[in-house]
Image (cartoon, helix red, strand yellow):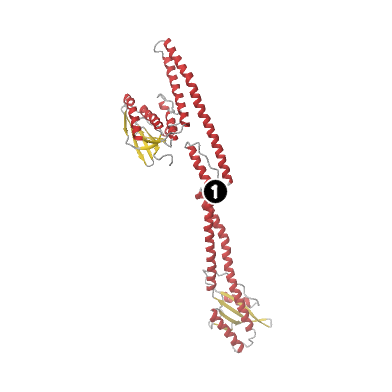
Amino acid sequence: MRTRLLPLLIILMAAVLLALGIPLAVSVAAAQQQKVVVDRIDDTARFAALAQYVTDPPGESNERKDTLGIELTSYYDVYDIRAGVFYRNDTPMAKAPSTFFLPKEGEVREAFDEALLSRRSHDPKQVWPWQRNRLVVASPVIRDGDVVAVVVTDSPTGQMRSRILHGWLVIGTGEFAAMLLAVGAALRLTGWVLRPVRVLDATTHAIASGALKSRVAAAGGPPELRRLARSFNEMADNVEDVLEQQRAFVADASHQLRNPLAALLLRIELLAFELPEGNQEIASVQAEGKRLAHVLDDLLDLALAEHAEADLKVTDIGALTAERVAAWTPTAEAKGVRLAGSCPPTTAWADPVTLSSALDAVIDNAVKFTPKDETVEVTVASDGGTSTIVVTDNGPGLTGEELARVGDRFWRSGRHQNVKGSGLGLSISRALLAAGGGSITFDHHEPHGLTVTVRVPRSGPAA
């Protein structure tokens, strides 16, 4: 979320800075050019004041014309600005340098023609730093109300463009610094806003993983997120209460039903003595009663497993697994199934009783569904921060849809309804392992069969 929110904020801030910086840069360029234009206007006005006293016809020379020529030459030598006073017929009264002349077209001619109309030429177009244009300013020389000549200045723009570029550099540096500050502020802002969201996400994941006691610390972040954290905690409290009531109901109901069911089974046994030996109906009733008793025992075990806390300790997983393999070997041999174990010594943090119960359920299922003369393999290994116990069989396996449901309460494959079981064994194992930070997963085993992987952490609870 931060990777989406942060670029959006940066783009918005960059747009704001550009919206402020571009007009400021244009204003700086206009101010620098206006300053130069005003200077040229003053210069042309001074030269026009000198030229209006030159009364001799064009081509003749006198002291005032010579003075004007000297002024224009000094002006050109000092400022490198071409300047000239031209009569209406384009004949120069005085000019500097000597090569300066009125062209037939272009900016100089346009400014000259405009000044002949008895007004100063319009301000030149804006010159940008990447352009090499020149600034042309023209002022009329008026004598007795008539325009007798025009003063024209043609200025280079190198220094002006340098000053504009320097001003832009200052603006750009300020914008860059402001952007850095804005990015830093955006990082702090997104961190402040999203920190409660990350805490909420982690807490939600913890609750989904079975840590129902997890809660969100309602501190930091905007008021709306703090209210959301409090609402989430209230919801988690209510969910935990409902689940606790459900577990208590299942445990109480299972416990309360066991005694009447035991009494009922006892009476069925006594009734069987009064009936002919081998009566199929009474045998069927006894089988269903025992199955119901087994389901009640599993329900009670599941309720206790979801409520109990694991007693974690450093356990030799290899030795514990080898013990369970040895315990189930007679059962497997009686069914004609080979049970092979590869159990090297490896340690992990686990509840030995819980892990033994989970292994019993997994190995029992593997042996139960494996055909005669096939093999069930149990392998212990270490993988980074976890120790794994992998049980593979060569039974019929499960389809992809069935694989997604295996481990659900009371679920059994439609193809195996004739096999004894309540559908709660793997659910109990999953609950027992989750309490200690472990897990159980299921996958296909090629060419056929099922692979069950039990994982327990190698690091202690403090880590």
Which residue is at the front of the view, 423 or 435?
A: 435
Give percent across and percent down for residue 409: 46, 29
Q: Quadrant of the C terminus?
A: top left
Q: Eyeballing the image, is 30 above or below 391?
A: below
Question: What residue sits right under mark 1 in the picture?
Answer: 193
Give percent across and percent down for residue 341: 32, 32
| Residue at the outermost right position | 144
Q: How many marks?
A: 1
Which residue shows up at 58% across the image and 70% down it? 32
Which residue is at the front of the view, 308 or 171?
A: 308
Q: Eyeballing the image, is 407 above or below 85?
A: above
Which residue shows up at 49% across the image and 21% down it? 257
Q: Could one spot residue 238 in this view of the protein?
A: yes
- Which structural element holds mark 1? helix
Give percent across and percent down for residue 125: 58, 70
Q: Amino acid at mark 1?
A: Val
